Image: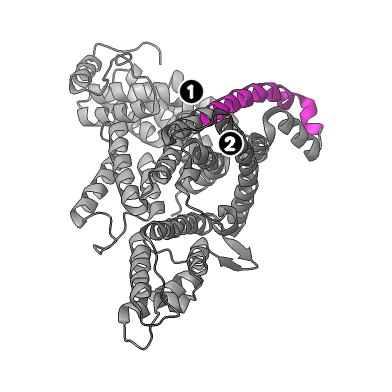
Amino acid sequence: MENNKATFPTIGELVREIFNITGLLAQKDRSNSFLSESNKKKLQTKLKRLADESSKIDGKLDELLDSLKHLLEKALGEERIVCMVLEAVEVLLATYKGVLGDDGTYLDKTNSTKWFIKQYVLDRVLLSFYKNYLRLNVPASKLSLPDLRIWALPNIEGQKISWPLRNAWQLIYDSLSISQSSFHYPDKSLEDYRASQNLENAQHWSTTDQIPTISSLFDNLEYSLTLLDSTSNDSARRIVSASEKQRLKLILFIGRVSAYCFRELERNFGREFLIECLKHVQGQSSRLSRINLRLEKHLKTVEKSIGSMSEVDVNQLYFYEISEYWEQFAISTVHGSRLLQGYINDESFSNLTELEKSKLVIAHVGTFAGHGVLTLLGMTPSVKGMPSEFPELFYEGLKLKKSPTSLGDIDNYHNRLRKAGLDDVLSWLVNWGYANYFYTHKSFDKSYGYYEKAFNQAKYSAGRNQYLLVNQYIESCAKNGKYKEMKKAVAWAQYLGIKIRWLRGWDDPESEGNLKGLYNLMGNHNMQYAQL
């Protein structure tokens, strides 16, 4: 039976996918593995604990991000690149936290994810990379990577897709002026099963959508370079420095990450959505690239005017100037968005042509942010695809759960949801209504099951309507001796920034002492809120 439950992915699912994207966790215990089997199991346990949301989600995220940093450092070696990746991950997590706490959804997990990617992920991650490329002075690393827009995106011709991993290998062959065959198997007069296998794997990865682990890619690269260094075939001999080898690894890493991301877009959401995302990324990358060119020119002018500077001073200059630029950009965009909202709310806006709308939007927030606004106008759930009866039944449910006078009223509401096909979308309001009914009648044992259902149904779909429900569920846990469940709910609420009654203002709300105090206070059956 198809699951149409309205929900965003869980925090644990998002973090697990971040690790999948890097390709650093799935690996065999070989020369280019980045963690031992025992450490791999420990990391998998941490991911599972995060998925359980048992306590201190922030703390578990910090542990996992430290592990990710360690893996990236071992794989890439270049500190600035590692920081760029981690900054993008932090932006992604912060954005998702904001969405969960503010934006509800009536879409199933697949379509909620699709909406989140198009509405937030592409622009936020791209902006993070372009901003931190200069902010962290990555040009000082002298990596000499070709323009990512040319090779790090899939190329679609008809039904055929050329994935970035193929382009990455081709860049390596071209940089050494050597063919694929000679790179992986330079001396075919010698029987070498591993070289033959490496060549076969590289050919397979270049012609299919299979995405290998980073350790497999690096194993192949390392062994191939070793053969090139020692081969008796003079025409194939190549000596690659340690710094150049690290650059080649970075090319493979970028190709692998990009190939994985875009393959998953097609696999989960279809070719049409993949093409939409590609066009979006290409357009926004060009806009950000133009901004970076202007900023680089400005930075060089400042450097020249100052004169001789140490590496530390140059890095500080880049960090300060770029941070200042994007802070002012954000302020300007917020101001322009407020003015623009007035125009959008006016009835005359809908009568404008698409070109006129575009000009108005760009005039207020610029080309980069403007493209995001125009995307929002075209695909936000409130504008496109919302079930016709959703708004009425949603607001009716919010009103009903506040003061349910009879079980019959809730039953009738539930039946209307079923008829409208919205049971999987708004059933949390039904259970919340039942819970509040039994709570007002002091049937705390009966209310608990309904609060639990409502909380679990709503936690990844109700957005800003969570506050009262989370607090009522926490109280119900305490009144029914469910300390472990209460801790999990507090952890989840704390992560999203949802205030918990009687824990506000505490330095460490999730300390055992504070949680026990809350548990004992809320567990008192004589303590009951008159208004829900």
What is the crowding at mark 1: few (fewer than 14 residues within 10 Å), some, or many (at least 20)? many
Distance (Cα) linking label 2 and label 1: 63 Å
Q: Residue at x 36, y 72 (%)?
A: 229
Please state which of residues 295 and 421 is positioned toward the viewer in this rendering. Answer: 295
Element assignment for label 2: helix
Q: In which quarter of the image is residue 354?
A: top right
What SS does tag 1 mark?
Answer: helix
- The spot of residue 199 in percent (x, y) is 41, 76
Residue 510 belongs to magenta span: no
Nearer to the camera, 282 or 94: 282
Q: Residues within 10 Å of mark 2 (few under 14, many from 20)?
A: few
- Whether residue 342 is visible, yes or no, is yes
Looking at the rendered structure, the number of numbered marks drawn on it comes to 2
- The magenta stretch spans which residues? 322-351
Q: In this view, does 289 lie to the left or right of 73?
A: right
Please give left or right for residue 416 compared with residue 196 in the image.
right
Q: Up-down: is 288 above or below 473?
A: below
Q: Which of marks 2 and 1 is nearer the N terminus?
A: 2
Q: Where residue 503 sits: x, y (%)?
A: 29, 16
Residue 214 falls in image quadrant: bottom left
Dot 1 amino acid type: Leu
Q: Which dot marks residue 400?
A: 1
Q: Where is residue 462 in the image (x, y as percent from the top left)?
A: 46, 31
Residue 185 position, x and y percent, is: 39, 79
Q: Can residue 388 be seen in this view?
A: no
